[in-house]
Image (tube, grey):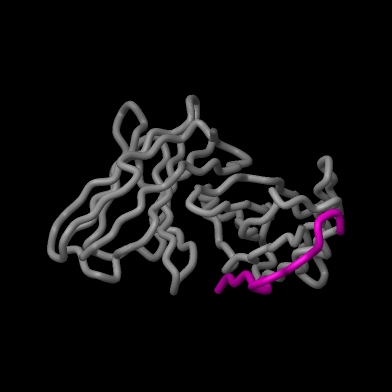
């Protein structure tokens, strides 16, 4: 158990819909990273927050957004969903400095 | 841009050593990681090495880093069936306080009993 929690574990929805994925980092970690794992693209970095502020952006679509709240949990919002958004979404958390990242169990999203 | 390459498959017999190889392109990489993913599970951090080290050993795991060739390897001694999983090599740079990981496609290790 990495100490990072993600909810829900599974999500099935329809094209055009909007979903919210939630992540709670390990105690003491200020950074939250979001990654997408798909069969064709592999594991790709989406976005990072550090202590409530956006720190870095990767291959995140404009239809996707994220935020980190004062209690440091983070949410990833996916809107206007398409079939190709079906993937495993991971969040990871880390501390300042070395930033070893510990991953949550992931949310498996299926868009039908 | 950054790129991490790994072979996709490796098959070994139980009790033998496994060696999983990885090459990367970002010369500014400061940390290099190995993660393990079992079927239906998340990513488990196995070990990492800082770029100024050549080798790191942790029980059955040995990481070798050849910085000149940008080559990283993970050796698993006495491989067990429980080691069957996908192993990801990942690198992180040091720019602007962000340490996002760039992953390889993963090497699927199959252990034959």
Please report the residue visible at 67 percent of the width from the left and 62 percent of the height from the top. Answer: B28
Q: Is residue B27 left or right of residue B101?
A: right
Q: Quarter of the image containing the C terminus of chain A?
A: bottom left
- Measured from the top left, where is residue A104 in percent x and y? 46, 41
Q: Quarter of the image containing the N terminus of chain A?
A: top right
**Residue B5 visible in the shown view:** yes
| Numbered marks: total | 0
> Which one is nearer the viewer's eye here, A71 or B27?
A71
The stretch of residues the image draws in magenta is B1-16
Magenta residue check for B4: yes
In the image, is residue A100 above or below residue A34?
above
- Measured from the top left, where is residue B68 in percent x and y? 82, 69
In the image, is residue A76 above or below residue B27?
above
Query: Which image quadrant for residue B14?
Result: bottom right
In the image, is residue A38 above or below residue B50?
below
Please report the residue visible at 44 percent of the width from the left and 74 percent of the height from the top. Answer: A40
């Amino acid at each position: 158990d990495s100490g990072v929690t993600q909810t829900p574990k599974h999500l099935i929805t329809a094209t055009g819909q909007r979903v919210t994925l939630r992540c709670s980092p390990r105690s003491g970690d200020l950074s939250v990273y979001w990654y997408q794992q798909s069969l064709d693209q592999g594991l790709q970095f989406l976005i990072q927050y550090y202590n409530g502020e956006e720190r870095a952006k990767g291959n995140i679509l404009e239809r996707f957004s994220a935020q980190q709240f004062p209690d440091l949990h983070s949410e990833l919002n996916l809107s206007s969903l398409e079939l190709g958004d079906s993937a495993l979404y991971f969040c990871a958390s880390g501390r300042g400095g070395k930033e070893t990242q510990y991953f949550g169990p992931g949310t498996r999203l299926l868009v039908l | 841009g950054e790129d991490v390459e790994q072979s996709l498959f490796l098959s070994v017999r139980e009790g033998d050593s496994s060696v999983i190889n990885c090459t990367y392109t970002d010369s500014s990489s400061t940390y290099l990681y190995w993660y393990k993913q079992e079927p239906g599970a998340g990513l488990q951090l196995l070990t990492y090495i800082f770029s100024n080290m050549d080798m790191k050993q942790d029980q059955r795991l040995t990481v070798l880093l050849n910085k000149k060739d940008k080559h990283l390897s993970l050796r698993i001694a006495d491989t067990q069936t429980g080691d069957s999983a996908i192993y990801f090599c990942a690198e992180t740079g040091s720019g602007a306080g962000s340490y996002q990981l760039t992953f390889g496609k993963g090497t699927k290790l199959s252990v034959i009993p």
